[in-house]
Amino acid sequence: MPVTAVVGAQWGDEGKGRMVDYLAQDADLVIRFQGGDNAGHTVVNAHGKFALHLIPSGIFNPFTVCIIGTGAVVNPATLLEEMGALEAAGVPLENLWLSNRAHVVLPYHRMVDGLQEAARSGARIGTTGRGIGPTYSDKAARFGVRLGDLKRPDYLRQRIALHLEQKNRTLALFGAPPLDLDDVMETCLGYARALGDRIVDTLPLVQPAVRAGKRVLLEGQLGVMRDLDWGTYPYVTSSNPIVGAASAGAGLPPSAIDRVVGVVKAYSTAVGAGPFPSELDDADGERLRLVGAEYGATTGRPRRCGWYDAVAVGHAAWLNGFTSLAVTKLDVLDGMRQLKVCTGYRLADRVIDYVPDTPDMAEVTPIYETWPGWDEPTTEARDWDDLPKAARTYLHRISELAGVPIEFVSVGAERDQLLKLELPA
Ligand code: IMP
């Protein structure tokens, strides 16, 4: 592998967690490079079923070093809960490290996220309410608190005092009560006591591993359509899920990344607001939601479901330079009479094959190809030849439209419900 990035090619929830869990079986290092506990990476393996929000999905391999990278934002309160749940399931956490440069999601970030979302009234983004946007805003405005600051109480007090007054003014605008410096400090010092030993400069872990050609996985959160720059702004998250951000977020040069696996669901889903051209508001959409158990792993919200959108995946393929695709949840399509694939958009009197800017994206209507479905269950398939012919044709078409070979196909949530395909030489 040496350095492999695993990133989302749609609206998030593509199944990156299960792919990282699988690939981490022989990885030396896994780094989560962006996002926060807005993620919900579902992993099913011998330890049980988990929705990981922050901890890299490589944590189940006791020999893999797992890093929450500099590009991530960390809510210590939810991280501690997540660590507790894993420990209770017998998952060892000795190899979990947090970058001292990653920013901290503080309780007021969550408050502000909720207040700002409410103030958007009719133009809500549908955020997860985890304080992600306000934390990245403070980072960019250079008011942020970093994990390393938690270990220096005097410096931390200065940092928090610096912007607490400002935060309190913002809270007052929303009619919310002010925060007290001592209370915030006490919360932060509690975090430091619980997590301090794991907060480190991560470069001494990353550099030698990359230099020695160790197997490194870079785990992204969300997908290209929620990318801050290339997604459907403003209906996006506040970081960049594309591989271009993996270098900065993990702390290695872009040229070190030699493989990029784009994870795509065999259909489309999205949570939150914003344009989603191939969304289905009918029995097929309802069926995808039911059979695919399409409910948010973080918020429990029903996901919006739709046909596979090859335009969105083409956008992702260009921006990420995928070396292969992992197609997940193929089994959810078993038993569907016919399948549609969106191959272009109609925008006024034009046909386009790219993702336009958001106001136009909100106006497009999808252009579909129709493909036959299959009746046979695919859940037991482990080789290409085990798949029904119609499923192979559908996968061929997905690959052809993306211009990227398929390396993995998942046919169920269990670790072994995965086909590993030969890539063209
Ligand atoms: P935020 O990242 O919580 O600010 O939310 C911004 C947008 O990203 C909203 O549409 C959310 O629903 C969406 N989002 C955030 N995290 C996830 C995720 O893990 N899966 C799917 N959508 C997400």
Image (cartoon, rainbow, N blue to C red):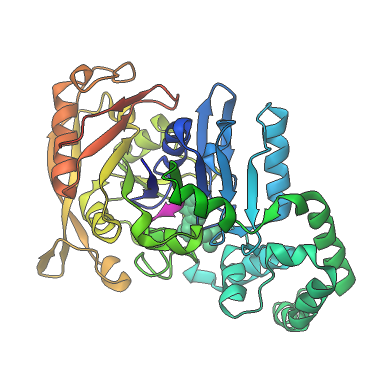
Q: Is residue 126 visible?
A: no
Residue 204, x across and y down, in percent? 58, 55
Residue 364 counted in the magenta span: no
- Which of 94/183 is in front? 94
Snapshot quadrant of residue 102: bottom right
- Which of 20/230 is in front? 20
Q: Give the tally of numbered discs.
A: 0
Q: Is residue 99 left or right of residue 358?
A: right
- Which of 424/309 is in front? 424
Q: Is residue 178 left or right of residue 330?
A: right
Q: Is residue 227 left or right of residue 365?
A: right
Q: Which residues are magenta?
A: 220-224
Q: In what quadrant of the picture does the C terminus appear?
A: top left
- Which of 43/90 is in front? 90
Q: In what quadrant of the picture does the N terminus appear?
A: top left
The residue at 29%/28% (across/down) is 420
Snapshot quadrant of residue 70: bottom right
Q: Is residue 412 left or right of residue 89?
A: left
- Asked if 130 appears above or below 421 in the picture, the reply is below
Q: Main secondary structure of the magenta part?
A: strand
Snapshot quadrant of residue 96: top right
Residue 223 counted in the magenta span: yes
The extreme right residue here reads 182
Residue 74, x across and y down, in percent? 64, 57
The residue at 71%/32% (across/down) is 87
- Asked if 12 appears above or below 381 in the picture, the reply is below
- Asked if 210 appears above or below 346 in the picture, the reply is above
